[in-house]
Each structure stands twice: as structure tokens, then as C-alpha cells.
Image (cartoon, rainbow, N blue to C red):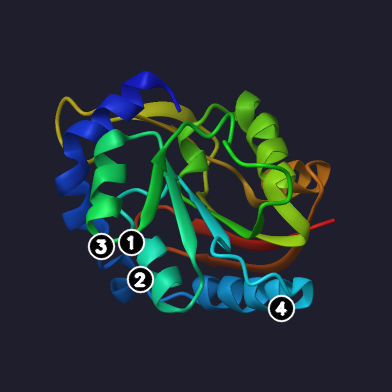
Amino acid sequence: MDQKTIDTYNKIAIEYEEETDDFWQRFPSKIIPEFIRKVRKNEFRHKNGQRRMILDIGSGPGRDGLIFENSGCPVVCLDASRVMIKMCRQRGLQAITRDFMKIPFNNKSFAGVWAYTSLLHIHKKLMPKVLQEIYRVLKDDGIFGLGLIEGTEEIYTNNMMGDAPRFFAYYKKRELEEILFDAGFEILYFEAFRPSSRRYLNFVMRKI
């Protein structure tokens, strides 16, 4: 994530939480239950019982991390915004401040990786590198949950408040499918829904 976008999230963290904290209540989706079910199945097969089960990349203030914890799936939240990570910790979540490009965990550390509307903040040319890192930290047959937004542009926008630019990269479904296949992921579940003027593209995948 570029520094301009990180600075914006540090600035608007409270406003962002207020705007998005009830997202799944306003826009119900099957992606989180599908992701959790497949992660649990994968973790049971490995019979590890680790304290860390899911890595939430670009966790924001911990909305989804809290869902995972309350579902019995221990989570580590990772975000480039120090303010977002502080908010995660205030919710009792394990959380670290890091960028997506170099994930600070060993190979095959997690049964699941979750990245919901976070990887849209990186340039498309960097997506293969980030996916390589996600692949690395997933266990064999690990589960990857991904949410992105449909479109074709790579742009900065001030769509939350003035003087708060954030970078967005939008994707077409077929474009994403090709990128994900090349990165070594098999799509197990897909849904699209429209909580705003754009469609959201939701995937649950398996590391192959």
C-alpha cells in the first residue's frame, strides 16, 4: 500500500469504522460463513489446534477479525495503518502493523488468509507479489478469502471525505480468475453483490 493511502487511513480511521462496522448487517453475504467453514475443515484435517488460525490482511479496525474470533477461529490482524491496528487491539484482537508486500510469518503458518477489500489498495502490477506472499504463509490446501470491487481503473479517490485520497485498483471477474489461477489458487466459491454503485467480487479459494 502506498504511503498516501496509509496516511489517509490513519487520518480517517474513526470515520471509516463508523461507516463500515455494520457492513455485513446492511449487506448480508455468504462469503464469511463459507470461508470459516472451509478453514475449520482444513484446520481439523491438519489437527494442529494452533492459537493462530486466520491471518486478516488489511484488517482495518477489526470488524471481520472480531467475527472470526467470536466464531472460534483465532485471528491475527495485519494492517499498514498504525491507528487501525490500535483499534484492533482495543477490541482485544492480536494485531500487527505491517504492509502486505512482506508478511512477517513463516511458511505455512495459517489455515486461512482473509483479505476483504484491502488488496484493491495496491497497484495491479504488485498483485502477483502479494499473492505469492499469501500463498507462502498458507498451509497446504489453505483457504484464501478475497473481496475486490469490479471495474477497470487504477485511480485515487476522495470518496469518504475531502482531502483524504486513497488508491483503488478495480478488476473484472475474468481478469481476477486468471491472476488467481496463475498464483496457484483454485476457486471454490464465488459471489457478486452490489452494496454500492459498483459490484463486489467475493472469492473463497484453496491453495493448490
Q: Which residue is mark 3?
A: 21
The answer to which image quadrant residue 24 occupies is: bottom left
Q: Secondary structure at mark 2?
A: helix
Picture quarter with the C terminus = bottom right
The residue furthest top is 3
Helix, strand, or loop for circle 1? helix
Secondary structure beneath dot 4 equals helix
Residue under pointer 4: 44
**Residue found at x 27% / y 25%:** 7
The residue where tag 1 is placed is 63
Q: Amino acid at mark 4?
A: Phe
Residue located at (28% from left, 43% from top): 84
Residue at x 68% of width, y 30% of height = 129
Horizontally, residue 77 falls left or right of residue 36, namely left
Quarter of the figure that contains the N terminus? top left
* Mark 2 vs mark 3, CA separation in Å: 8 Å
Rounded to the nearest angstrom, the CA distance separating label 1 from label 4 is 25 Å
Give the alpha-carbon distance from disc 1 to disc 3, as whole Å.
Answer: 6 Å
Of the numbered discs 1 and 3, the one sitting upstream in the chain is 3
Inspect the image, locate mark 2, and give the three-letter code of the amino acid beneath it.
Trp
Give the image location of residue 166, x and y in percent.
33, 30
Q: CA distance from mark 2 to mark 4?
A: 27 Å
Visible in this render: residue 158?
Answer: no
Secondary structure under tag 3 reads loop
Discs 2, 1 touching: Cβ within 8 Å: yes
